[in-house]
Amino acid sequence: MTTELKRQMILNAAEDAKAERINALDLHGKTLIADYFIVCSGNSDVHIRSIADKIQDALREVGERALRVEGYREATWVLLDYGDVVVHIMREEARQHYGLEAFWQNAPLIESLREHTGDESRKRAGSEARRD
């Protein structure tokens, strides 16, 4: 499976699970950790686990399994490591505190979905969008 297809499947699954503030950061050439970080928020431990489950189920259907899953039990910050794509599902408080997007502010922003709670309009920054 290509990295881009994996990224898109993860974004779709997160959106289907009603994740909030879904962002994909393009890390090509910025780190060896991964090609993409996907960062999204959930509003409760049940919601965060549900987002993680939805993503894992979608990728399992095509034969992809996470190399590592961290934080599932606590569900304040769940990390799903798919090698080239790493998913961070966080409570909004943890997301603000750790500031992953601010840390990687020079990474191009590929997707920006569900900017606000309940926004069903699928706001997209577009695949060519870049942060300044």
Image: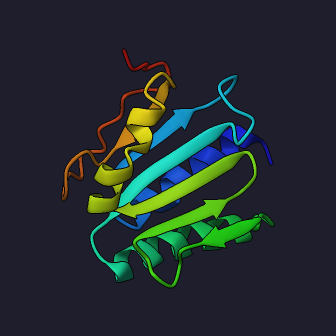
Report whether residue 115 is seen.
Answer: yes
Judged from this view, the residue extending furthest toward the top is: 132
- Where residue 30 sits, quadrant-wise, is top right
Q: Residue at x 72, y 71 (%)?
A: 60
The answer to whether residue 45 is above or below residue 29 is: below
Q: How is the image coloured?
A: rainbow
Which x, y percent locates residue 79?
57, 63
Q: Residue at x 50, y 57 (%)?
A: 88
Which x, y percent locates residue 27?
62, 31
Judged from this view, the residue extending furthest toward the front is: 97
Q: Residue at x 73, y 41 (%)?
A: 3
Which x, y percent locates residue 16?
42, 63
Question: In the rendered picture of this protein, how many numbered marks are placed on residues?
Answer: 0
Q: Which one is in front, 10 or 30?
A: 30
The answer to whether residue 20 is above or below residue 59 is: above
Q: Position of 1 compared to 132: left or right?
A: right
Quadrant of image for the C terminus:
top left
Q: Which one is in front, 94 or 119?
A: 94
Q: Residue at x 66, y 48 (%)?
A: 85
Q: Position of 111 compared to 117: left or right?
A: right
Q: Position of 129 compared to 58: left or right?
A: left
The answer to whether residue 6 is above or below residue 61 is: above
Which x, y percent locates residue 122?
31, 44
Report whether residue 61 is seen.
Answer: no
